[in-house]
Amino acid sequence: MNLQAIIEKYLSRLPEGIASKIFNSIKDIPFIQKEIQKEIDKMMAEMESSVKPYKGKVESFPKILPHHESCFMNESCFPSAG
């Protein structure tokens, strides 16, 4: 039986306060941490397409270049187009 099935079968029936205390006491166990991380990774992968709808369709940039007032309308601050 996987972790999700156990949680749904047993912990979901408990009052929220008790379930929360149980979760807080077991969440530092390495196996539980791995299972939690798997679930988080799965959720993030599902959400990524809605958060980044243009991923793979347009160019992306790892960082925004800093803005300097001295570069305003100064062609030397911009890379040449050709």
Image (spheres, helix red, strand yellow):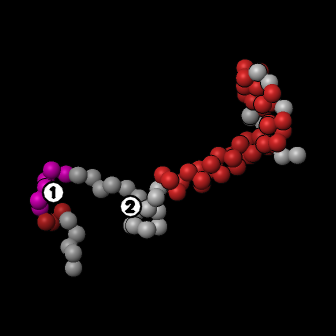
Identify the disc placed on residue 46.
none
Please tell me whether mark 1 sits on a helix, a strand or a loop.
helix
Please tell me whether mark 2 sits on a helix, a strand or a loop.
loop
Relative placement, left or right, of 59 versus 7 is left
Of circles 1 and 2, which is in front?
2
**Residue 12 falls in image quadrant:** top right
Considering depth in this image, is 54 or 75 the residue closer to the camera?
54
The image position of residue 36, as x and y in percent, is 71, 42
Considering depth in this image, is 20 or 70 the residue closer to the camera?
20
Direction left: furthest residue: 73
Q: Residue at x 81, y 27 (%)?
A: 13
Q: Is residue 22 visible?
A: no
**Amino acid carrying mark 2 in the image:** Phe
Considering depth in this image, is 35 or 43 the residue closer to the camera?
43
Q: Which residue does the numbered mark 1 point to in the structure image? A: 71
Relative placement, left or right, of 80 versus 18 is left
Direction bottom: furthest residue: 82
Sequence-first disc among 1 and 2: 2
Q: Residue at x 21, y 75 (%)?
A: 81
Q: Residue at x 20, y 73 (%)?
A: 80
Q: Which residue does the numbered mark 2 point to in the structure image? A: 61
CA separation, marks 1 and 2? 20 Å
The magenta stretch is 68-74
